[in-house]
Image: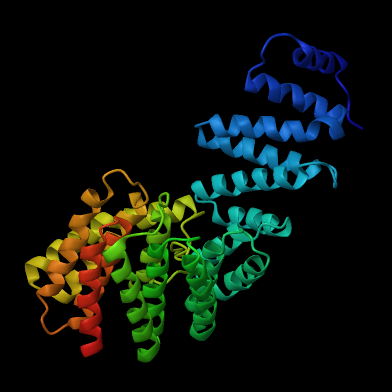
């Protein structure tokens, strides 16, 4: 039996009814008391108040305690109460992110499983992909994609296709990505999406088909992308679009997955195929590889080992895109040197047209992101000719 401190209840009610403006900490304290007396009226407010404290807190241990408290309170909200599902999702999401930020993956995964049970499978799919459990992640992605969660199909379809590809199910991955591509073609024709996004998707699809030896399918996608790029170079986008760098970065990072170590539960890697929700510990570890890669690049340059240097430089460029590839301020100025150097290095390999075509394609797609369409078309036209001749 819970012993009720009536004086504490009275103080809490006076605080809430008073003319002053309570602090967030005072509000949370009042709702903690009142939620025990009248859970139906106050448990949801307790979740909101504790999460407000969580979002302004900067101490890792305190953040974890607050997130755990919010999760416990959210679970206690009666079924059918307004906003119960939304509050439970916010609380569990904060809890799992805080656990992963502290490297407590097993506990974080358990909270993600609770989120999936509550109807939000995205975080669990991301964690599974980070650990190389691509088939399981793809099964969750399929359910989310078919239910249009999230509503914008690019994000769920790309992640689903990426996880199918990671599981070695290349034909299934191509079917899913092809479905997205068909939808984007229709939207671009109606000017409901940008030609840039259509270009990036076509180029990525060509890479997917080339990876499994479907030269005909890869060439057809490249030719279509070149046609769209020619239109962009000639007339530009039919409409002005807000920042779409997330689309470019997501597909660029995904194109680099094969060059990275394989993901496993013991050594998780980023969930290539999504731009959202990376576990903080995984993102930090991925970026922490930069100094070693830069040292490796310097050693390869001194040794004259150009093919390996081209590959390592691309891995460095991928990490630069992870770090701040969606910040539009001085975007072209900041990133152009990475892609120019990639092309310059690849041009020093006259007997390796595939690496040069890859570097030119990378720079072309970056230039599309920078809205510099004529040079983008020139680069991709050269890349296409190299691959067609090869």
Q: Residue at x 37, y 91 (%)?
A: 216
Residue 265 visible here: no
Front position in the image: 7 or 252: 252
In the rendered image, the vertical position of residue 77 relative to residue 49, given as above or below:
below
Residue 294 in which image quadrant: bottom left
Count of numbered circles in the view: 0
Give coordinates of residue 128: x percent, y percent: 56, 66
Residue 314 coordinates in the image, percent (x, y): 25, 66
Vertical comparison of 50 with 235: above or below: above
Q: Quadrant of residue 27?
A: top right
Which is more toward the observer, 122 or 249? Answer: 249
* Residue 7 higher or lower than 209, as above or below: above
Classify residue 127 as left or right of residue 263: right
Residue 281: image x %, image y %?
45, 52
131 left or right of 306? right
- Quadrant the N terminus occupies: top right
Residue 251 visible at all: yes
What colouring method underlies this structural image?
Answer: rainbow
Say which residue appears at 50% left-offset and 51% top-offset. 103
- The image quadrant that residue 38 belongs to is top right
- The x, y position of residue 168, in whole percent, is 49, 82
102 or 325: nearer the viewer:
325
What residue lies at 21% left-to-right and 83% top-to-bottom? 385
Q: Which quadrant, please, contains the C terminus?
A: bottom left
Farthest residue toward the right?
1
């Amino acid at each position: 039996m819970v012993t009720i401190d009536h004086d504490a209840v009275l103080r809490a009610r006076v605080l809430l009814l008073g003319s002053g403006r309570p602090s967030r900490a005072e509000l949370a304290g009042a709702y903690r008391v009142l939620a025990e007396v009248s859970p139906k009226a106050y448990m949801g407010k307790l979740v909101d108040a504790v999460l407000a404290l969580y979002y302004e807190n900067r101490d890792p241990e305190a953040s974890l305690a607050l997130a755990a408290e919010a999760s416990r309170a959210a679970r206690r909200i009666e079924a059918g109460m307004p906003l119960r599902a939304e509050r439970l999702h916010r609380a569990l999401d904060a809890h799992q992110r805080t656990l992963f930020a502290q490297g407590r993956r097993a506990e974080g995964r358990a909270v993600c499983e609770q989120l999936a049970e509550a109807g939000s499978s995205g975080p669990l799919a991301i964690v599974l992909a980070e650990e190389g459990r691509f088939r399981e992640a793809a099964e969750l992605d399929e359910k989310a994609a078919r239910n249009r969660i999230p509503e914008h199909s690019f994000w769920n379809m790309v992640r689903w296709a990426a996880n199918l590809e990671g599981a070695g199910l290349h034909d299934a991955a191509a079917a899913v990505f092809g479905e997205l591509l068909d939808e984007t073609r229709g939207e671009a024709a109606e000017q409901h999406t940008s030609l840039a996004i259509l270009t990036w998707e076509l180029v990525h699809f060509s890479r997917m088909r080339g990876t499994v030896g479907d030269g005909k399918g890869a060439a057809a996608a490249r030719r279509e992308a070149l046609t769209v790029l020619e239109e962009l170079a000639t007339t530009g986008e039919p409409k002005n679009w807000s920042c779409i760098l997330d689309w470019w970065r997501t597909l660029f990072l995904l194109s680099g997955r094969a060059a990275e170590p394989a993901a496993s539960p013991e050594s998780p890697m980023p969930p290539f195929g999504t731009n959202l929700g990376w576990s903080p510990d995984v993102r930090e570890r991925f970026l922490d590889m930069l100094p070693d890669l830069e040292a490796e690049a310097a050693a390869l340059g001194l040794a004259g080992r150009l093919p390996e240097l081209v590959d390592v430089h691309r891995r460095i460029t991928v990490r630069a895109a992870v770090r701040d590839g969606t910040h539009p301020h001085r975007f072209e100025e900041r990133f152009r040197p990475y892609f120019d150097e990639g092309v310059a290095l690849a041009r020093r390999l006259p007997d390796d047209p595939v690496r040069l075509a890859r570097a030119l394609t990378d720079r072309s797609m970056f230039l599309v992101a920078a809205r510099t369409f004529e040079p983008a078309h020139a680069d991709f036209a050269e890349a296409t000719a190299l691959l067609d001749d090869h």
